[in-house]
């Protein structure tokens, strides 16, 4: 039916035909939009990685870090196919509190390593806190200016997903891909707070602790139990007026290390001073690391440690899978807050609450299995 408002006699308000408006978004900017991850086949990733193609390696690492199940399926296949080509590297963990000079040092160590020892270097990181800042606190290219433009380096910020276990697993899997791509030196940077040091230690052949002199920090490492897992300790910023203090701190550490039992490797950790910023004493630090590697390769500890780490990661993967399976279970999720309220309210004990949750989980599993 003809609408009265369309009649020419109609005197009320009419709505004009609109004119087409240009988009408020500059069309030029469209080309800058974030591209969706283009997926290749497993074989394409593997071939690219084995050829040392940085872009393919980088995209495969992105899949490893992705939380999407379809990415994970490809990533796991790629890792498995790369596994036979991995392992031929020296993996070095570097830890220190924020401000200790990790990125400055890795920049110096890395360039010195590539120029004097040759080969290729990948820098990865473990920083579970980067979830909060949505990104790249550690292993960031902008923090390693010289190394990041070196053709034989590959730098990757910390994966920013979830739990420490999850972040560490992704970093460990990325190590495999980097090794398959021919990176014969891997540095794993981690921040010297909390459990991430232990996670880093569980995937490297040498764990280096960066300390500072004169911060009253000397005893902290000892208190935190970190000295036990360090294979070497270095005092950074041994430059200018700080040289004397650094030497003094080094002798404190040497004395303290004698109080600990001999490490399993059979090699007493060394202590060195250096300046990452001014590039002083860098070769001393690198030769300390590679001397250790030569010794543990000769006495069998290198392989023993890697085997122990593989076992550890098998158990870790099982634990993580079970944990996720439990916490993602909808019945468990629906009961969790009620149970924790009851525990907090003193109505039931933690153990009873845990048992109720586990019972509900297992009985649902049984029902599902019998279907
Ligand atoms: P990170 O947080 O451990 O990665 O530490 P950075 O590498 O960002 O360094 C923290 C600060 O210490 C920066 O201002 C650096 O310039 C400074 N720094 C790092 N290494 C040295 C060094 O060898 N000597 C001196 N004097 N300063 C340094």
Image (spheres, rainbow, N blue to C red):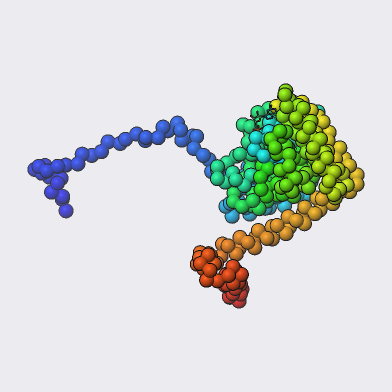
Dividing the picture into quadrants, the one containing residue 362 is: bottom right
Q: Nearer the viewer, residue 106 or 321?
A: 106
The picture places residue 315, in percent across and down from the top left corner, at: 72, 59
Please indicate, yes or no, whether residue 99 appears anywhere in the rendered image.
Answer: yes
Q: Where is the C terminus found, in terms of image quarters?
A: bottom right
Please indicate, yes or no, whether residue 89 appears anywhere in the rendered image.
Answer: no
Q: Is residue 6 above or below residue 120?
A: below
Residue that appears at 59% across and 55% down: 69
The picture places residue 147, in percent across and down from the top left corner, at: 69, 30
Q: Nearer the viewer, residue 128 or 255?
A: 255
Q: Residue lying furthest top in this view?
A: 240
Dividing the picture into quadrants, the one containing residue 178 is: top right
Q: Is residue 64 above or below residue 342?
A: above
Residue that appears at 76% across and 31% down: 246
Q: Is residue 214 above or below residue 326?
A: above
Q: Nearer the viewer, residue 304 or 53?
A: 304
Q: Nearer the viewer, residue 236 or 9?
A: 236
Residue that appears at 34% across and 34% down: 22
Residue that appears at 77% across and 57% down: 311
> Where does ligand 1 appear, by image quarter?
top right
The picture places residue 196, in percent across and down from the top left corner, at: 67, 47
Residue 14 appears left or right of 186: left
Q: Is residue 16 above or below residue 167?
A: above
Residue 3 appears left or right of 93: left
The picture places residue 235, in percent across and down from the top left corner, at: 75, 34
- Total label count? 0
Residue 341 appears left or right of 195: left
């Amino acid at each position: 039916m003809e609408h009265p408002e369309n009649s020419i006699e109609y005197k009320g308000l009419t709505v004009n035909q609109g004119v087409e408006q240009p988009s408020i978004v500059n069309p030029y900017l469209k080309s800058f939009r974030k591209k969706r991850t283009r997926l290749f086949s497993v074989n394409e990733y593997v071939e690219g990685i084995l050829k040392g193609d940085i872009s393919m390696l980088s995209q495969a690492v992105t899949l490893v870090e992705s939380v999407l199940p379809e990415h994970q399926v490809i990533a796991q296949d790629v890792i498995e196919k790369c596994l036979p080509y991995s392992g031929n590297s020296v993996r070095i963990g570097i830890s220190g509190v924020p401000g200790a000079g990790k990125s400055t040092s890795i920049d110096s160590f890395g360039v010195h390593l590539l120029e004097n020892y040759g080969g290729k270097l990948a820098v990865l990181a473990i920083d579970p806190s980067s979830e909060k800042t949505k990104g790249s606190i550690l292993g960031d290219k902008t923090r390693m200016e010289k190394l990041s433009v070196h053709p034989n380096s590959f730098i990757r910020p910390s994966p920013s997903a979830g739990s420490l276990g999850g972040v560490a697993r992704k970093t460990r899997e990325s190590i495999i891909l980097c090794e398959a791509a021919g990176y014969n030196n891997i540095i794993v940077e981690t921040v010297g707070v909390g459990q991430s040091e232990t996670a880093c230690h569980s995937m490297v052949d040498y764990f280096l602790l960066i300390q500072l002199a004169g911060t009253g920090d000397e005893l902290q490492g000892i208190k935190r139990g970190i000295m036990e897992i360090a294979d070497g300790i270095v005092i950074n910023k041994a430059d200018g007026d700080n040289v004397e203090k650094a030497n003094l701190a080094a002798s404190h550490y040497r004395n303290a290390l004698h109080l600990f039992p001999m490490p399993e490797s059979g090699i007493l950790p060394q202590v060195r001073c250096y300046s990452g910023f001014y590039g002083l004493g860098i070769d001393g630090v690198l030769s300390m690391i590679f001397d250790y590697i030569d010794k543990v390769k000769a006495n069998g500890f290198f392989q023993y440690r890697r085997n122990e780490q593989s076992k550890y990661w098998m158990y870790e993967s099982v634990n993580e899978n079970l944990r996720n399976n439990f916490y993602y279970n909808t019945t468990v999720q629906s009961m969790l807050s009620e149970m924790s309220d009851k525990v907090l309210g003193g109505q039931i004990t933690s153990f009873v609450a845990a048992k109720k949750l586990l019972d509900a989980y297992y009985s649902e599993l049984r029902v599902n299995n019998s279907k």
